Image (cartoon, rainbow, N blue to C red):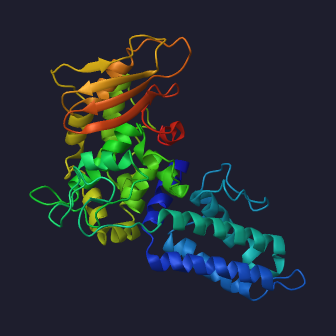
Amino acid sequence: MSSREIETEIAVKIALLEPKDIARLRGIAELASVASVKSVDGRPSVFTKVLRGRLSHFLYDVLGLKSSSDFPPGPGIMPNREPDKHAANVASASQCLLGITTSSLLAEPANMRPADLNLVKLLLGRLCELVDSVHEVRELSDFGWQSNDFNSGWHSGLGNSEYDLSLVLNALRSPEKDWLPPKDPAGSGRMADFITYWFSLCAIVLGHLAWSNPTLGIARWVNSGMPGDGGVLSGLKRLYGADVAALILNRNVPEAANMVVTRVLDRRCTGDEAYDPSQILLRSSAITQAVGSRRRWSAMSSGGSDSLHLNEHLRRLLLGPGPQPIRLAGGHDANSVPRAHLLLPDAYGWYESLHLRGDGLPDRSDGRSWRVDVTSAPLGYIGEFRKSRETGRWFAGKHSSHMLGN
């Protein structure tokens, strides 16, 4: 299997873990700590055999991994090296643990040294830390969108639990505020269940993060424990939690990303950008069963006919500006404050408008990047954007977050 196949598969499986499976992983980590302490005269105790059985069950039966040989060679943690606790992600930690369970170390406890047990303990501790971060408990509201700091423009009440894009943008630009996302954002009316919930996530991933390879970006983020960045990713974690991994199972999202890349960069997409693991992953009976038990995920992974109409809605939102005049305020003097304001009469085509107007800004004599504040009449303030010198894309937030999916 290729590295990206491993990354996406493990990210989905980690996000789909049940509370009982997470508790089981914590128990295995505690057992590893006991086994390392109980080793006598440099020889492992009976706890080592129990550890091997429980760890093998978790890796093979819960995560559905097959063999360490399925993992591609790379800079992951090796059994003969002390792991960097903060560098290991879920994939590399799983790879190493899988290799240990199939080696003679746990198979023949007499061969295991205290250092080997300590390695297992550290790897399991890191894996627990990452899984707990992905499944971090979020405070949700039974009454739709709520905010204690700014109620103006926010809705409450059971009848309005949708993830309207303007509300999501409001939440993203104020991650420190005391707002609560709705517990059940299925939506109401004639639209498909969760259509605005998933549409808003895709709009932010393609427009604000500007990921040309959204499945890879999500997989990398989940496998690293979904760390916050004080910006866009922090907001998405609070809004969606582990649900973000469902994006990997929708084939229309990479198609929409390719459409944006082709339009704004005027170039053909590469194989990496066109990578779609959804059909491969949905052939797994374990993944299909787990997805089927989650209403939100089922809506995102249904068929290839784009039942949520994501392609059409994302195309209209991000591409094809309307005929009404667009105003770019500031940005004419290359020696002035490095900030301009893009004012849009409607929301349609806002991202392409940003590229067209932003790319036309003069080079600055001080070498600094332009910051462009984008505002549309119906959506309000969309965000502050700058252009990446590496990808040529305009994005919001941290450049490291932008590069996760590029």
Give 200 or 123, whichever is nearer the viewer: 200
Q: Is residue 185 above or below residue 2?
A: below
Give 361 or 205, whichever is nearer the viewer: 361
Name the residue at 72% across, 78% down.
33
Instruction: Write down the quadrant of residue 48 in the picture.
Output: bottom right
In the picture, residue 16 is in which quadrant?
bottom left
Q: Left or right of 68: which side holds 359? A: left
Query: Residue 88: x and y, percent?
Result: 65, 56
- Report whether 284 appears left or right of 46: left
Q: Position of residue 117 (x, y in %)?
A: 76, 74
In this view, the residue farthest toward the right is: 41
Above/below status of 7 relative to 115: above
Q: Quadrant of residue 273?
A: top left
134 sits to left or right of 74:
left
User: What residue lies at 10% left-to-right and 59% top-to-bottom?
Assistant: 189
Residue furthest out toward the left: 190
Taking the spot 13% from the left edge, 55% from the top edge, the residue there is 191
Q: Residue 307 versus residue 147: which sits nearer the camera?
A: 147
Numbered-mark total: 0
What residue is drawn where x is 63% and y is 62%? 93
Image coords of residue 364 (percent x, y)? 50, 13
Q: Can you see residue 5?
A: no
Asked if residue 28 can be seen in this view, the reply is: yes
Q: Position of residue 254 (x, y in %)?
A: 35, 42
